[in-house]
């Protein structure tokens, strides 16, 4: 058996918590240069004779030319490595299909050079270990091992590619053997050499052997994969695995016989880099019997469409958490709030320092998000707006599913539009809800955050079982008033923001549960996680204004994006806005698929893949906000273009102009001193509103400023 460095055969004694190790150290394999990753060695440590009978290893070679192969059955030489109960005199046969083509009892000294070239550990001269060296054409081979002296014991069965630079390679290997307890569990191992990684289907079949007439099978095998002494993956029952559908599909692709759903057989589907690995096959509750352990080289995993988990908080201010939105700027975070899971997400993703909502209030901002347009172009300037100017088929979920019909979409949580979630493409949804829906009467489920999270996790589990990509929008009711929190969380805080802080931490706890579920399901590396607030809020004077106000406090929001190809812990200073989300998801999921006419957002893809640096190309080169009606606020509109932002008040026709880059808090009105910039931006703003709202609605706005 070959290892690039010391590695252990490991087996667990069910009556002891300790691991028993027997180390084998060999020379490294010859370098393979530019060859891709491949199986170059596979082995199994098995029991032979008596109740164990004759183990039957097998392997399949694929290619066009012959491959030099080394097959060994090592028994007495295992004593050198302190393995007790070794088989004294193994006998090895080699069959092509049903025809015996070679056999050996005691290995030949002439084969020592091949063993060295293959990288196997040396056998003592004159030992009774068995070995066959043969040039084999592509085909299916078996190599039964028995005891020449009818004895019993443990042996190491090995198959090596002796000339791994050739094109013909191992694509499948297996061993049918008795699985006992303690030192007689089945321990297969293998080596991957070359460059890159290899995708393998590994199975431990017990009950699945019964239809083939095999008796005394292992009723419930468990399979654990190791690299060195570190466990990488484990499985007990294959059909309960999160990727069961993928396992079944891959088994069909490689020609493996099908396993019955619900059987006790075990299977793993893994992608591994070059290195040496071992596995342990044992019976649950120390059961014993015959099992078949199989290794199949699987086709590379298809490039799966990415999943999207969009976490939308409600009314959370730009700095209403513990993540600094601007690196090193103390007031861009709330140091008294505890949001460790958002901090963790930030270490894996990009923090957008200049992210904006499409509107300073909930409903309109969400319409902008879903439809990829400013609220004025959509003709959705208030929550009472019914006659949107774009068809619902243009929504983010509908567009994504049109680009790739495999996508499933779900919307859980707050939804306050007349248009239903189903009409906008969400297959799973809560229907039309209101703010008060989230005012929970269950003290263990404040703002319904925890129950929403549990349902989201169930949804993701179901999609993984189906093998479908998903777009899941989590529209939490937190942190919108009224504030609610777990009593245990509230006990951590004091002061006038205590309930708000506790509610924020509860939301963060739920975000952590979602992130852990992605890890558990094995899809974190193919899921974009987008955290954002629907609009701004109270920033404790860090920014001007709050919800409903087009000042920075009302429209600037937290935004963190993590996912495939994104360098963690990065900041982006590029201005982005909520209605960019639709074209961004489409560009990540289906590059080249055209967005609908009228979409005004642009893709963040170049920023996400370049460490936060880059620009966004949009059909319009401006951000526009418009709030005609909001209690206690004057009707006003705003536009940002480049570094400048203009706010226009309709009731008295006054203008404010700020350089946002130099004056984030909007304290210095430049309208009187930079009239050229102010006039240009005001004209562009008014033209945008007229085009989107139409002449009658625009005339009504103009009328507000008449004496």
Image (cartoon, rainbow, N blue to C red):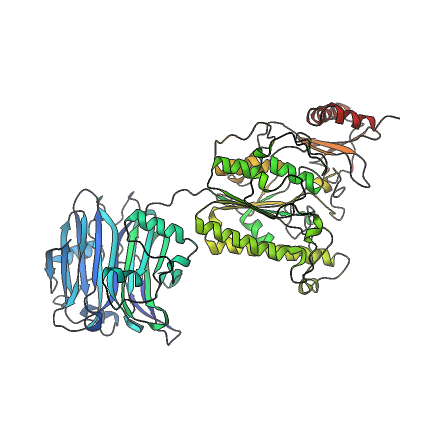
Residue at image location 68% in from the left, 46% down from the top: 318
Percent from the top left, x then y, of residue 362? 69, 42
Above or below 67: residue 499: below
Residue furthest to the right in view is 707
Residue furthest to the bottom in view is 15
State which quarter of the image contains the C terminus.
top right
**Quadrant in the picture for residue 548:** top right
Which residue occupies the foreground of this view, 659 or 177? 177
Q: Is residue 145 left or right of residue 589?
A: left
Above or below 486: residue 68: above
Residue at image location 81% in from the left, 39% down from the top: 633
State which quarter of the image contains the N terminus.
bottom left
Which residue occupies the foreground of this view, 493 or 234? 234
Percent from the top left, x then y, of residue 586? 52, 36
Q: Is residue 229 left or right of residue 139?
A: right
Q: Is residue 428 left or right of residue 438?
A: left
Percent from the top left, x then y, of residue 202? 32, 56
């Amino acid at each position: 058996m070959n290892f690039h460095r010391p590695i252990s055969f490991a087996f667990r004694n069910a009556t002891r918590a300790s691991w028993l190790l027997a180390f084998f150290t060999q020379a490294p394999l010859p370098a393979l240069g530019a060859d891709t990753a491949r199986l170059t060695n596979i082995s199994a440590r098995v029991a032979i004779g008596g109740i164990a009978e004759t183990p039957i290893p097998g392997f399949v070679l694929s290619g066009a030319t012959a491959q030099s192969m080394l097959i060994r059955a090592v028994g007495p030489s295992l004593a050198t490595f302190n393995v007790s109960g070794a088989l004294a005199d193994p006998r090895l046969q080699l069959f092509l299909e049903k025809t015996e083509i070679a056999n050996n009892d005691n290995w030949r000294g002439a084969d020592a050079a091949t063993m060295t070239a293959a990288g196997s550990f040396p056998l003592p001269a004159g030992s009774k270990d068995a070995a066959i060296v043969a040039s084999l054409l592509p085909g299916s081979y078996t190599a039964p091992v028995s005891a020449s002296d009818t004895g019993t014991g443990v042996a190491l069965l090995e198959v090596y590619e002796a000339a791994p630079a050739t094109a013909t390679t191992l694509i499948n290997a297996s061993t049918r053997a008795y699985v006992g307890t303690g030192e007689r569990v089945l321990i297969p191992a293998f080596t991957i050499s070359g460059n890159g990684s290899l995708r393998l289907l590994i199975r431990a079949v017990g009950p699945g052997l019964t239809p083939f007439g095999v008796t005394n099978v292992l009723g419930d095998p468990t399979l654990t994969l190791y690299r060195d002494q570190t466990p990488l993956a484990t499985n007990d029952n294959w059909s309960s695995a999160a990727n069961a559908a993928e396992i079944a599909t891959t088994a069909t692709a490689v020609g493996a016989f099908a396993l019955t759903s619900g059987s006790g057989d075990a299977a793993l589907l893994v992608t591994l880099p070059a290195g040496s690995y071992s596995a342990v096959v044992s019976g649950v509750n120390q059961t014993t019997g015959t099992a078949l352990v199989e290794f199949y080289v699987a086709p590379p995993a298809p490039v799966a469409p990415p999943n999207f988990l969009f976490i939308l908080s409600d009314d959370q201010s730009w700095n209403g958490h513990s993540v600094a939105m601007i690196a090193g700027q103390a007031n861009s975070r709330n140091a008294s709030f505890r949001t460790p899971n958002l901090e963790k997400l930030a270490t894996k993703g990009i923090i957008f320092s200049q992210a904006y909502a499409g509107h300073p209030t909930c409903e309109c901002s969400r319409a902008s998000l879903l439809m990829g347009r400013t609220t004025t172009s959509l003709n959705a300037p208030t929550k009472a707006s019914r006659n949107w100017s774009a068809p619902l088929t243009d929504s983010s979920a509908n567009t994504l599913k049109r680009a790739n019909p495999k996508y499933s979409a779900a919307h859980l949580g707050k939804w306050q539009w007349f248009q239903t979630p189903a009409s906008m493409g969400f297959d799973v949804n809560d229907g039309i809800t209101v703010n008060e829906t989230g005012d929970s009467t269950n003290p263990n489920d404040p703002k319904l955050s925890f129950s929403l999270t549990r349902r989201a996790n169930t949804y993701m589990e179901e999609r993984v079982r189906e093998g479908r990509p998903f777009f899941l929008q989590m529209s939490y009711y937190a942190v919108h008033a009224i504030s609610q929190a777990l009593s245990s969380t509230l006990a951590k805080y004091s002061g006038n923001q205590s309930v708000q802080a506790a509610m924020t931490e509860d939301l963060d706890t739920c975000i952590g549960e979602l992130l852990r579920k992605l890890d558990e399901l094995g899809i974190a590396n193919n899921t974009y996680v987008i955290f954002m607030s629907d609009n701004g809020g109270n920033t404790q004077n860090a920014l001007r204004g709050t919800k409903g106000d087009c000042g920075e406090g009302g429209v600037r929001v937290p935004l963190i994006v993590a996912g495939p190809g994104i360098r963690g812990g990065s900041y982006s200073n590029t201005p982005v806005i909520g209605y960019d989300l639709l074209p961004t998801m489409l560009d990540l999921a289906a590059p080249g698929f055209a967005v609908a006419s009228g979409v005004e957002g642009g893709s963040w893809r170049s920023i996400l893949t370049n460490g936060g640096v880059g620009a966004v190309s949009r059909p319009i080169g401006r951000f526009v906000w418009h709030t005609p009606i909001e209690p206690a606020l004057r009707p006003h509109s705003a536009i940002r273009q480049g570094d400048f932002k203009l706010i226009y008040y309709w009731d008295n026709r006054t203008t404010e102009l700020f350089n946002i880059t130099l004056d984030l808090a909007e304290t210095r009105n430049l309208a009187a001193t930079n009239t050229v910039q102010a006039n240009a931006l005001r004209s562009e703003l008014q033209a945008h509103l007229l085009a989107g709202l139409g002449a009658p609605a625009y005339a009504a706005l103009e009328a507000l400023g008449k004496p």
